[in-house]
Amino acid sequence: MYRVQCIKIDTSFSGEMRYDDFRTKLLENAGRPAIVNVNIGTTVKGAIDDLDEIISTLENCGFRDRFYIHCDGALAGLMLPFIKQAPKVTFIKPIGSISVSGHKLLGCPTPCGVVINRLKDIDVLKSTNIEYIASNDVTISGSRNGQSPIFLWYKLKSMGYEGIRREIEACLRNARYLTVHLKNVGISAFMNSKSIIVVFEKPKDEVFVQKWQLACAGNVAHVVVMPHVSFEMLGIFVEELTEKRYALLQDKEFSVPCVALDIGQENCLCKLHENIRSSL
Ligand SMILES: Cc1ncc(COP(=O)(O)O)c(C=O)c1O
């Protein structure tokens, strides 16, 4: 939209930014300013980039006063404040903005979200006076949904801090259960420790993928263990997947696919990585 050159930074199998690659790309672009999108929960793997590491890399590479950091916390941004030992995403650090979605974790019925910026950046936009609403406006279209803040307010007020904390705790517990359960039945699986997203070997059965509306990316699929996803639902999911898989395992041609590049060798249950592990 702004016609700014976009440079992608490599990630490790967990989905987290590779800071060595970040450093290389900063040095290749020394002398230019950097706008950095820090992921506070990536879409597919729920990986959280290390904000402190990113800030110190920027400073060490000479970008001291030439960077702007946006923290994209669409899903996990609302979770971190409720998780013990989670990294702190805060304006005490030199970040420019944070965004979270309202229709994901909080379940608002229409797409909505919150972006928090520094006042000095908002002030630049104050000159945008929209005549027909007799107001200063900072949206691109000069228009917004008035119901969304009410939904957000209602959800936050009705659940309260403790209610949200309990819900997140349950989601994390269920996600851990799903990961272990999948591995126990021989399906390669992985989750980042402060995420509610479980990534696993993409099921071969398209009907199963459609039925459960699984989001797939390359060799893997993921389940986002949201508050409505119960322990029982996960049990049924794994049971059905195991049945499909049992049928596949009867086929002599079938071998468990290798997903080490997608979710790490230690989480891959293909023959090669099983053999390597057992020989250690
Ligand atoms: C990391 C990340 N950022 C942004 C978005 C988009 O957020 P929204 O739906 O609030 O525009 C998503 C949605 O899946 C996401 O996963």
Image: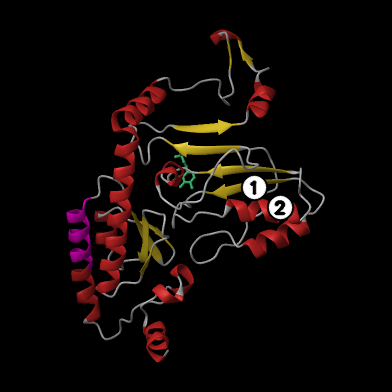
Reading the image, the residue beneath label 2 is 58
* CA–CA distance in space, label 1 to label 2: 10 Å
Quadrant for the C terminus, please. bottom left
Indicate whether residue 233 is drawn in magenta. yes
Q: For the residues labelled 1 and 2, say whether their Cβ atoms are less than 8 Å apart.
A: yes
Viewer-nearest residue: 47 or 1? 47
Reading the image, the residue beneath label 1 is 36
Residue 19 appears left or right of 82? right
Indicate whether residue 36 is drawn in magenta. no
Badge 1 amino acid: Val
Q: Is residue 262 placed above or below 279 in the rendered structure? A: above
Which residue is the extreme one toward the bottom?
A: 279
Q: Main secondary structure of the magenta part?
A: helix
Instruction: Provide residue 217's location: percent of width, then percent of height.
Output: 43, 60
Q: Quadrant of residue 113?
A: top left
Residue sitting at 57 percent across and 8 percent down?
Answer: 134
Viewer-nearest residue: 71 or 202? 71
Instruction: Provide residue 119's location: percent of width, then percent of height.
Output: 63, 26
Badge 2 amino acid: Leu
Q: Which residues are magenta?
A: 230-241
- State the SS at label 2: helix
Instruction: Provide residue 33's location: percent of width, then percent of height.
Output: 76, 45
Is residue 138 something one can see in this rendering? yes
Q: Is residue 227 placed above or below 233 in the rendered structure? A: above
